[in-house]
Amino acid sequence: MHVLSVSSLKGGVGKTTVALGLASAAFSQGLRTLVVDLDPQCDATTGLGAIGEFGETVADVLQNPRHSVVHRSIVSSTWTKLHPGVIDVMVGSPKTQTLDSPSPTIQEIWRLEIALAKVEREYDLVIIDTPPSVNGLTRTAWVASDRVIIVTEPSLFSVVAADRTTHALEELRKGLTPRLETLGILINRFRPQSSEGDFRVTELREKYGNRILPQVIEERTVLQQAQGAGRPIHGWPGESATEISQTFDRILEFIQKSLGQKTPSRVGRNSRKVMRLNRVLRGQTLDEVLKDEAAEAAETAVQNILGLNQEKN
């Protein structure tokens, strides 16, 4: 099972639309797919047709990632009415907003990873729709992920937000989860006839080079129509929907090539990695641990330099 987070530090860039488009591509290809809705607005849950009252949600999972809680929080999408397959959603909840701490503890940051370990044999791909911030919920998603797509739009503030997201991801990767990699920056809501859009796309490509994904998602009303109707874009009629679907297919292909054939195992509660982190659970926040990791890395680097100098002498 591979895990992909779809993230942005700026709201309104179509992050959930991208997450649902990729889920649609995966479902159409027969991949057993789970969407985890971490955004308190719960748009991914609605877009997957999961509407109503649910006994357990992702908010309950983040508080208590027991096997029974995890399974009760997952429901099947109504997309399966179009054709058979597995496309499920870990139901979102506005209650997750209260869990979005700016200074999460290590124990809190690890819970989604533990939860996904309970279902790793049931899915090929997990797509996490994260909130538009770099607080606890987003970093919880990143810790559980193998790859992250950063969604942006061709505007000044989105360019700045993409830069902040990239730095936050790199800090977390170095300090806590080396498995995590930034897949790239995906430009969404591109208007082909906009001079401002062309300028910002050029600016992004000059700044990030090949970290900008080759695919660009144009702004199309069919995406909002399909999402509002609780339907996959691959099942929406019309030439425009077909073109957008093919774009998401190419992005998914890019993701699969990046992930390769090797399927990483989720950690268990008694894994060596979790046990190592449990040693620092005494009230320490993630930021404190990352700071300690950075200090330790700097000290090691200094010692290595001194060691080399001693050898030369």
Image (cartoon, rainbow, N blue to C red):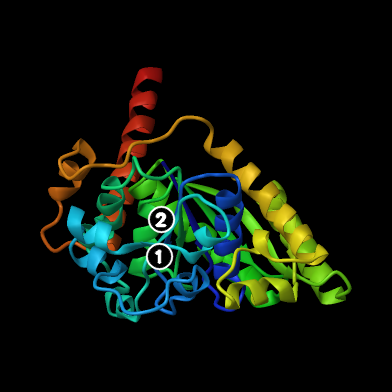
Which residue is painted at 33% across and 43% down in the image? 120
72 in relation to 173, above or below: below
What's the distance in space between the residues labelled 2 and 1, CA to CA?
A: 6 Å
Which residue is painted at 54% across and 33% down in the image? 260
184 in relation to 305, above or below: below
Secondary structure found at label 2: helix
- The residue indicated by pointer 1 is 138
Query: Is residue 268 visible in this depiction of the protein?
Result: yes
Q: Give 199 or 92, whichever is nearer the viewer.
A: 92
Do the CB atoms of the residues marked 2 and 1 lie less than 8 Å apart?
yes
**Left or right relative to 271: residue 203:** right
x and y percentages locating residue 45 in the rendered image: 45, 71
- The residue indicated by pointer 2 is 142
Q: Give 77 or 260, whichever is nearer the viewer.
A: 77
Q: Residues within 10 Å of mark 1 (few under 14, many from 20)?
A: many
Which residue is painted at 34% across and 23% down in the image? 310
78 in relation to 263, above or below: below
- Give the quadrant of residue 89: bottom left
Mark 2: amino acid: Trp
